[in-house]
């Protein structure tokens, strides 16, 4: 074979010389002394050498770790990239197993022996830490292993090709955590704050994290301003436990440690105090008995937690920007028995859920305060009529709705006037809450003042309508006046958009006369006409608000017909009669507050 002198042609090499050709005719000997190749010419040797150089360049320049293992899984070869991944020179691997070289890395040798046994390639994930520097605390490698055989099918070992997948795997775990967080938040958030009831909102929050995030959860809030209990000692934090949720196995034990409704004083250094002082989640795992003594509010609580085998605790603050105080309270999560410890990711999820729930809790807290004020104002004004005239009995009843958001503007009144007359009043202010209760008080005072001036019912309504409109008061109200003269058994009515009264007789008949109806009070343009009718002989006169007869799923005429069917007992107290009315008409789903006022002539008076 000719070649250019002094150089290497496209097909040439350093082997293309006479000595080389002579050597090429000699057999190449393998490591065990057996002849593996007999070259007839230099071209064959040159080709093999060239292929070897190419393959070696590929293997040693690859951006993947490559290793050859013998049948005992000892390293025969590692490429430079594998050496860099492991943080050891290639020579330090040879003749040793993975456990010998890197005891901090786990790989299933059982799977590798299956590759040796059946020749089927397999993939493995290795995990652990090597001696090489890495930004990842835990490293992972995905490797593929193939069996090596000689021409006779004899198994020589395994070749493995691996990639460091620590970054992608960490990103995948972060993505899964993000999805888990979003799933939990999206599932739990709509279930919190479904009503304006503070107690129920707290329970919804506790239920939202059990069992998804914890084995038990406790919601505790600072007591409201109206709580009459004595102040806690200096440095002591007092919270009221509002709600508890726990897995069935922990429920009884946790109720001993966190009974809802109880006030708990937290000493300085307790977990709750530390959380609220820092404004950040407080997390502690594998809590020892001495730590429980220091972290629990009282020694008996520490005993209860240890008795329930609680080993980890996470406390997050409940706070809202712009709230009256620095915090609303805390959400405490506990894990017990075989549950895993809390992680920082758990803390992040819980903190975000608590932030979302805090808005609902603040709304419920404000409403509870407003509701208490409205109800107290309303009840202070709606006192029982008492004995107004020896010839007439009266009784009244006020029932707030089942939905506490509907406390507000229903009212009744009974006013003793000169010459033995009595003015019965029933009314309903538009809207609910403190504003409606205040408006009710305004209407009630105005009507009383006009009645004491000796005006007729229709004139009273006319003046009240204009007074309210001119004062700029925006809440209109319906109102029915009934001026009763016990001497004549006559009643003079005037109606401002209200439901008509009902007269019931002992014989079972009901009278609901055609009383002229004017516009509600507060428009400033109302004109009202009086209507006179006798009191039912031996019967009662019933005035009521629309909460008694209005239902979303029922026509009001059906409810009024049910009301007219109420039987009046021949005698007995009027309070019993009101009980009968409510039992017959109110039903189970009261949707609005109800005011009732009943009057009966006393034949013995």
Image (cartoon, grey):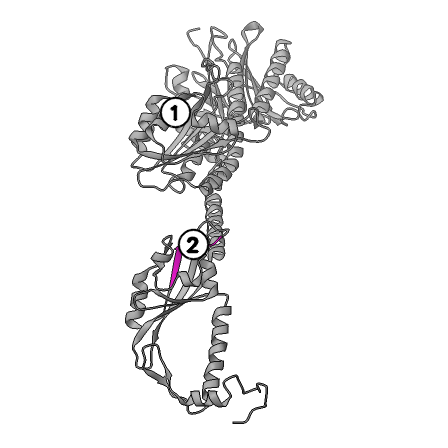
Residue 599: where, in percent of width, then height?
47, 15
Residue 474 horizontal side relative to residue 50, left or right: right
Q: Residue at x 34, y 35 (%)?
A: 311
| Quadrant position of residue 332 | top left
Neighbourhood count class around disc 1 (C-alpha, 10 Å): few under 14, some 14–19, many 20 upward: some
Q: Looking at this view, name the residue that lies furthest to the bottom.
A: 1
Whether residue 95 is visible: yes
Counting every numbered tag in the picture gives 2
Proximity of marks 1 and 2: CB atoms separated by less than 8 Å:
no
Q: Is residue 205 above or below residue 155?
A: above
SS category of the residue bearing label 1 = helix
> Which element carries disc 2, helix, strand or loop?
loop
Q: Which residues are magenta?
A: 124-133
Q: Tell whether 124 sits left or right of 453.
A: left
Residue topped by disc 1: 294
Where is 602 relative to 72, above or below? above
Front residue (pair 511, 206): 206
Report, in whole angstroms, how far the alpha carbon at label 1 lies from the one at label 2.
40 Å
Residue linked to disc 2: 130
Coordinates of residue 481 in the picture (x, y in percent): 57, 19
Q: Is residue 285 above or below residue 541?
A: below
Point out the tag, 1 or 2, that comes first from the N-terminus.
2
């Amino acid at each position: 074979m000719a070649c250019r002198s002094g150089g290497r042609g496209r097909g040439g090499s350093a082997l293309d010389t006479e000595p080389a050709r002579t050597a090429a005719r000699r057999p190449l000997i393998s490591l065990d002394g057996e002849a593996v190749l007999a070259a007839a010419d230099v071209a064959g040797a040159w080709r093999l050498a060239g292929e070897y150089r190419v393959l070696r360049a590929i293997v040693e320049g690859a951006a993947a770790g490559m290793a050859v293992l013998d049948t005992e899984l000892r390293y025969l070869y590692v490429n430079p990239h594998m050496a860099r991944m492991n943080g050891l020179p290639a020579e330090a691997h040879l003749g040793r197993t993975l456990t010998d070289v890197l005891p901090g890395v786990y790989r299933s040798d059982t799977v590798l022996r299956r590759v040796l046994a059946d020749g089927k390639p397999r993939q493995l994930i290795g995990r652990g830490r090597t001696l090489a520097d890495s930004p990842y605390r835990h490293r992972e490698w995905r490797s593929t292993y193939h069996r090596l055989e000689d021409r006779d099918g004899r198994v020589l070992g395994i070749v493995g090709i691996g990639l460091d997948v620590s970054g992608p795997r960490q990103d995948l775990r972060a993505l899964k955590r993000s999805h888990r967080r979003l799933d939990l938040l999206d599932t739990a958030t709509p279930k919190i704050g479904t009503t304006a009831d503070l107690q129920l909102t707290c329970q919804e929050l506790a239920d939202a994290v059990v069992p998804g995030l914890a084995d038990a959860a406790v919601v505790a809030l600072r007591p409201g301003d109206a709580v009459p209990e004595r102040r806690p000692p200096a440095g002591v934090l007092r919270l009221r436990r509002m709600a508890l949720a726990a897995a069935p196995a922990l429920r009884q034990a946790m109720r001993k440690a966190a009974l809802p409704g109880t006030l708990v004083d937290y000493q300085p250094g307790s977990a709750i105090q530390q959380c609220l002082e820092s404004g950040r989640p407080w997390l502690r795992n594998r809590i020892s008995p001495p730590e429980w003594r220091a972290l629990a509010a009282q020694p008996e609580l520490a005993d209860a937690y240890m008795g329930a085998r609680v080993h980890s605790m996470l406390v997050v603050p409940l706070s809202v920007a712009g709230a009256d105080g620095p915090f609303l309270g805390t959400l405490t999560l506990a894990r017990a028995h075989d549950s895993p410890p809390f992680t920082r990711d758990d803390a992040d999820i819980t903190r975000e859920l608590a932030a979302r729930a805090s808005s609902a809790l603040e709304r419920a807290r404000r409403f509870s305060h407003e509701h208490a004020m409205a109800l107290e104002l309303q009840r202070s004004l709606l006192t029982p009529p008492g004995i107004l005239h020896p010839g007439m009995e009266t009784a009244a009843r006020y029932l707030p709705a089942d939905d506490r958001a509907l406390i507000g503007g229903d009212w009744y009144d009974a006013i003793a006037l000169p010459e033995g007359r009595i003015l019965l009043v029933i009314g309903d202010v538009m809207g609910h809450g403190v504003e409606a209760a205040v408006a009710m008080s305004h209407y009630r005072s105005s009507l009383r003042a006009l009645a004491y001036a000796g005006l007729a019912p229709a004139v009273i309504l006319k003046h009240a309508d204009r007074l309210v409109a001119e004062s700029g008061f925006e809440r209109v109200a319906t109102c029915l006046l009934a001026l009763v003269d016990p001497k004549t058994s006559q009643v003079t009515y005037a109606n401002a958009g209200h439901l008509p009264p009902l007269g019931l007789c002992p014989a079972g008949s009901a009278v609901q006369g055609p009383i002229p109806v004017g516009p509600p009070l507060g428009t400033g343009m109302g004109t009202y006409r009086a209507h006179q009718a006798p009191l039912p002989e031996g019967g009662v006169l019933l005035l009521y608000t629309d909460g008694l007869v209005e239902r979303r799923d029922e026509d009001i005429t059906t409810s009024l017909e049910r009301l007219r069917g109420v039987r009046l007992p021949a005698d007995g107290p009027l309070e019993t009669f009101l009980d009968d009315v409510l039992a017959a008409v109110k039903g189970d789903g009261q949707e609005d507050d109800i005011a009732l006022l009943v009057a009966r002539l006393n034949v013995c008076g």
